[in-house]
Amino acid sequence: MSAPRKVILISSIRRVFGRAPPLSPWDSPKPVREELFSLARLEEHARSLALAQRVALKPIKGYPLAGRLADNAAALLDAYRASHARVLIIELFPFGRRQMRFELLPLLDAAKGNALVVCSVRDLIQPRPAREDEMLECFEHYFDRLLVHGDPRLATFERSFGKAARLAGKLHYTGYVVQETGEQGDAGAGEVLVSAGGGAVGRRLLETAVAARALSRLKDRPWRVLAGLNAEDTGGLEGEGVIAGRGAVINARVGLGRVVLIGFRPQWRGQPFGTFRVLFNAPLYRNGDAR
């Protein structure tokens, strides 16, 4: 019997006879899944973990985290071998996601010489000059191509990766690839759009744009600022006084029905999970008994 199944069986027997608390998440053999947490969601998650996990003076037997990570790497490797893939595309690594190398390096070892190995990155990455030699060594050892999703006439990869010249021959710019939008309406016409993704590095840009609005020739136009994960306190961009007394969500009765107006994007990928409730409550709980 494998270690994970043995742990689950023993824990289940003890739970039936009232000798053990509910099964710990660390005893689960399921692959570890990475989630995107906001600060508020991370604090909530930490509180729930603190309530669920036992504190003991001696180590508690269970399925170790290292074993779960090894299982993740094995599952990824099995999936690759079963696919018989001739091309393997990995996003960002080794120019980022260094923490995932425990499962990516075995995959790359298996693919080397058996498939075309491609790294896919955006045009501007988070600069890490101290690790550039390490990144280059890994790339040159495993990868055949580097696809940079951008246009060098606008921004070269070298702007955020100083040793990009050593990638000559393998580096290819794809341009900005987008889906066909079809017919465009008038929505957003005449607006000024400011967006920096969901990363913390973009917050300064958003704040600078808001501060510069009054000096712009477009100051009388509507400005739409897309603030992601690290700017979720939207009022923090212009000060809480700007949004004080205004509704983020309005539930209004119209005729025989109700209209729910949501002033932010609850389904956007950078929003904390807690905001999803706002979206689902709107159609599911029409009488206001939201949960």
Image (cartoon, grey):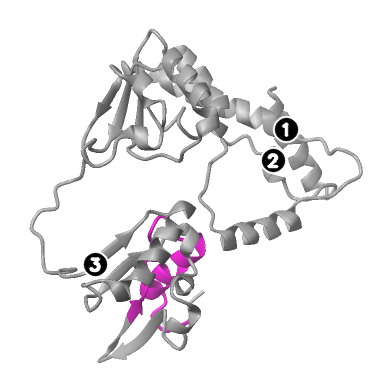
Amino acid type, label 1: Pro
Vertical relation: 173 (above or below) 81: below
Tell me the CA gap for discs 1 and 3. 51 Å
Q: Observer-nearest residue: 288 or 221?
A: 221
Q: Tag on residue 64?
A: 1
Give x and y (percent) for residue 117: 36, 18
State yes or no: discs 1 and 3 in contact (Cβ < 8 Å). no
Q: From which residue to which does the magenta span run?
A: 260-289
State yes or no: discs 2 and 3 in contact (Cβ < 8 Å). no
Query: Dot 2: few (<14), some (14–19), or many (≥20) neighbours within 10 Å?
Result: some
Q: Observer-nearest residue: 111 or 277?
A: 111
- Give the mark nearer the N terminus: 2 vs 3: 2
The answer to if 263 sits in the magenta stretch is yes
Q: Is residue 234 left or right of residue 218?
A: right
Tell me the CA gap for discs 2 and 3. 48 Å
Vertical relation: 260 (above or below) 17: below
At 41% from the left and 25% from the top, the residue drawn is 163
Q: In the rendered image, which residue does mark 3 sit on?
A: 192
At 71% from the left and 36% from the top, the residue drawn is 8
Number of on-image labels:
3
Query: Dot 3: few (<14), some (14–19), or many (≥20) neighbours within 10 Å?
Result: some
- Give the mark nearer the N terminus: 1 vs 2: 2
Tell me the CA gap for discs 1 and 2. 7 Å
Give x and y (percent) for residue 233: 49, 69
At 16% from the left and 70% from the top, the residue drawn is 190
State yes or no: discs 1 and 2 in contact (Cβ < 8 Å). yes
Which callout, 1 or 3, points to the residue nearer the camera?
3
Amino acid type, label 3: Val
Q: In the rendered image, which residue does mark 2 sit on?
A: 26
Give x and y (percent) for residue 136: 45, 21
